[in-house]
Structure formats: structure tokens, C-alpha cells
Image (cartoon, rainbow, N blue to C red):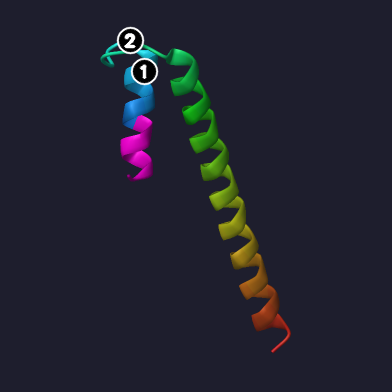
């Protein structure tokens, strides 16, 4: 399952369109986790760019 599919599933839970059981609390938790993951991925990219800049300066 991709993050997008997981996000769509979570949103359907929040929107009360999921069947057979509605669990918006789970949907909200999943979306929070996805947001956290995306922030971590962005931070990793920033650190990689910084590392590459530092490596090229010291070469």
C-alpha cells in the first residue's frame, strides 16, 4: 500500500464514508503519522543537501 492509498483510506475514515465500520480516530492518527513521515523525509533531504555541499567544499 502506498502512502497515497493510506492517506485516501484515512481520509475516508474521517469523512465517515468508509464501510463497514467508521473509525475517524484511526484515520486521524494515520494522517498525523503520514504528516510526521513527510516532515522527516523533508528533513533528511535537507541534511543530504547540506552534507553534499559540505563534502564538495572540503574536497
In this view, 2 is above or below 9: below
Q: Which SS does the magenta portion mostly show?
A: helix
Side (left or right) of 51 relative to 3: right
Q: Which residues are magenta?
A: 1-7
Residue reaching furthest to the bottom: 59
In this view, 48 is above or below 38: below
Residue reaching furthest to the front: 20
* Label 1 secondary element: helix
At 55% across and 50% down in the image, what residue appears?
Answer: 42
Tag 1 residue: 13
- Measure the alpha-carbon separation of dots 1 and 2: 5 Å
On the image, the x and y values in percent for residue 20 come to 27, 13
* Label 2 secondary element: loop
Q: 40 or 54: nearer the eye? A: 40
| Residue 3 included in the magenta stretch of the image | yes
Residues at circles 1 and 2 in contact by the CB criterion of under 8 Å = yes
Q: 49 or 22: nearer the eye? A: 22
Which quadrant would the C terminus be assigned to in this image?
bottom right
Tag 2 residue: 16
At 32% across and 29% down in the image, what residue appears?
Answer: 8
Amino acid at each position: 500500500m502506498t502512502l497515497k492509498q493510506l492517506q485516501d483510506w484515512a481520509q475516508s475514515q474521517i469523512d465517515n464514508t468508509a464501510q463497514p465500520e467508521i473509525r475517524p480516530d484511526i484515520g486521524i492518527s494515520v494522517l498525523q503519522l503520514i504528516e510526521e513521515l513527510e516532515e522527516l523525509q523533508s528533513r533528511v533531504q535537507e541534511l543530504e543537501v547540506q552534507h553534499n555541499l559540505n563534502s564538495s567544499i572540503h574536497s
